[in-house]
Image (cartoon, grey):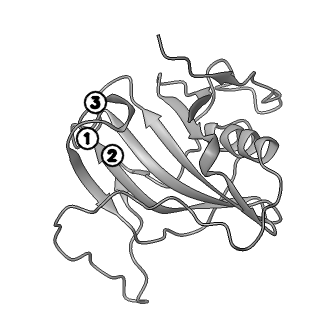
Amino acid sequence: MWMKATEGADGTVFYIDRDSIKKEGSLIRVWELQDLKAKGPLEEKSRRVLVEYDSKNERRRVLSFSFHGESMGAGVTLKSDQTPGKWTMVVPNTTAAVVFQVASALKRPVGKTSALPPPPPPPPSPPREQASDGSTPTISEGGKELNDSSEPLEGNKNDQSASSNNSVQPKTDT
C-alpha cells in the first residue's frame, strides 16, 4: 500500500510501500515511488525505486529502479535497471532522510526468511558501460544522480538546522 512520505521542493511526491519494508540488522529495504510534477528527461512521470538504507552508517543505495510514462508507476516502462548503485550518505533535511525516517518508524525487525517483492520486469536495453575499476557508472539525469534523493524539502531549502519532522500522510483513494 503506497503511503505519502514527503514532497520535494520541485513538487515531486515521494511515496513508500509500507508493506514492502524489510529490516535485517542495520539494513532497511523499501520500495519508493517518486511521482513527478513535471516530466523527467526520459519523458517519465514517475519512478519506482527499491532503496536500501544502512542505519548504522547513515547511507543509502538504489538496488533497482524503473521509469514509467504515467503517474504512480503506471503506463509504459521507459527504462529499468536491477544493478545495485553505489552507497551515498543520507543528507539531513532531504527527501531521502525523511523517507528513511518514515520507513524506520514503520518497520520492526523481521526474520531472515522474509522476501522482498519482485522488481518490475526489465525492458530490453543495451549493455551498460563499466568504469575502468570494473564498477557500474552512476546513473544520472541532468547531472543529478538517480540514487541521490538529496533534494531539499519544501520550506527547508536553505535551513539545514530545520527539523525534518514532517507528518506522515497516508494516500487515500478517492
Side of 108 where 46 appears, left or right: left
Circles 1 and 3: CB distance less than 8 Å? no
Give the residue at mark 3. 39
Spot occupied by residue 79 in the image (x, y as percentages of width and height): 25, 54
Side of 67 where 160 appears, left or right: right
Spot occupied by residue 22 in the image (x, y as percentages of width and height): 68, 58
Residue at image x 83%, y 52%? 108
Instruction: Point out the residue furthest to the bottom here.
Output: 133
Front disc: 2 or 1: 1
Residue type pointed to by label 1: Pro
| Quadrant in the picture for residue 97 | top right
Give the residue at mark 2. 142
Q: Secondary structure at mark 2?
A: loop
Residue 40, placed above or below residue 131? above
**Which one is nearer the viewer's eye here, 114 or 29?**
114
Residue type pointed to by label 2: Gly
Q: Residues within 10 Å of mark 3 (few under 14, many from 20)?
A: some
Which numbered disc, 2 or 3, marks the residue that appears first in the sequence? 3
Residue at image x 32%, y 25%? 38
Residue at image x 47%, y 28%? 12
Residue type pointed to by label 3: Lys
- What number is the disc on residue 41? 1
